Image: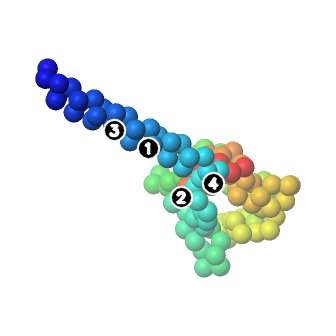
């Protein structure tokens, strides 16, 4: 190889290494943020649930086409809801709604979103922004 090509190739490789090093340092410093994921606020209701007229969340009726029921009905399409005021603050079994803005979600020393995360993971109810929240 001629000397000219060796010099050009050496300079190009040196510049590439320097650019990649700066890029790696930049990426490393950008990752060190401690922000919770996903960013707040989460959706009002769990996935495939609807918002009722009063702002609470309508519990889906168990049918063959129902989505995201989790273990609310014990994993079957028949039977009564397993939600009670003890395991689900803000539940109204008469109207089949849950008020996730109820102040009782913040009891027990945890934040409301952390208690809602535990609730959704326990009952297998998918709630994007809550069931995958990592700030607890």
- Label 3 or label 1, whichever lies nearer to me, is 3
- Identify the residue at image location x=72%, y=53%: 114
- Label 4 or label 1, whichever lies nearer to me, is 1
- Identify the residue at image location x=57%, y=55%: 38
N-terminal of the two: label 3 or label 1? 3
The answer to whether one can see residue 61 in this image is: no
- Label 4 or label 3, whichever lies nearer to me, is 3
| In this picture, residue 120 sits left or right of residue 30 | right
- Identify the residue at image location x=45%, y=54%: 65
Alpha-carbon distance for marks 4 and 1?
22 Å
- Label 3 or label 2, whichever lies nearer to me, is 3
| In this picture, residue 79 sits left or right of residue 12 | right
N-terminal of the two: label 3 or label 2? 3
- Residue 62, percent across and down? 56, 55
Residue that numbered label 3 is attached to: 15
Q: Is residue 112 above or below residue 2?
A: below
* Figure quadrant of residue 9: top left
Residue that numbered label 4 is attached to: 35
Residue that numbered label 1 is attached to: 23
Alpha-carbon distance for marks 1 and 2?
38 Å
- Residue 47, percent across and down? 53, 58
Q: Residues within 10 Å of mark 4 (few under 14, many from 20)?
A: few
């Amino acid at each position: 190889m001629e000397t000219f090509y060796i010099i050009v190739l050496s300079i190009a490789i040196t510049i590439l290494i320097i650019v990649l090093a700066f890029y790696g340092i930049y990426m490393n410093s950008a990752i060190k943020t401690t922000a919770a994921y996903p960013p707040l606020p989460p959706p009002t209701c769990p996935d495939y649930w609807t918002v009722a007229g009063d702002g609470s969340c309508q519990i889906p009726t168990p049918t063959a086409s129902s989505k995201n029921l989790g273990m609310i009905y014990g994993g079957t399409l028949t039977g009564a809801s397993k939600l009670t005021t003890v395991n689900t603050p803000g539940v109204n079994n008469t109207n089949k709604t849950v008020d996730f803005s109820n102040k009782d979600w913040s009891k027990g020393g945890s934040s409301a979103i952390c208690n809602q995360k535990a609730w959704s993971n326990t009952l297998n109810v998918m709630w994007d922004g809550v069931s995958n929240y990592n700030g607890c």
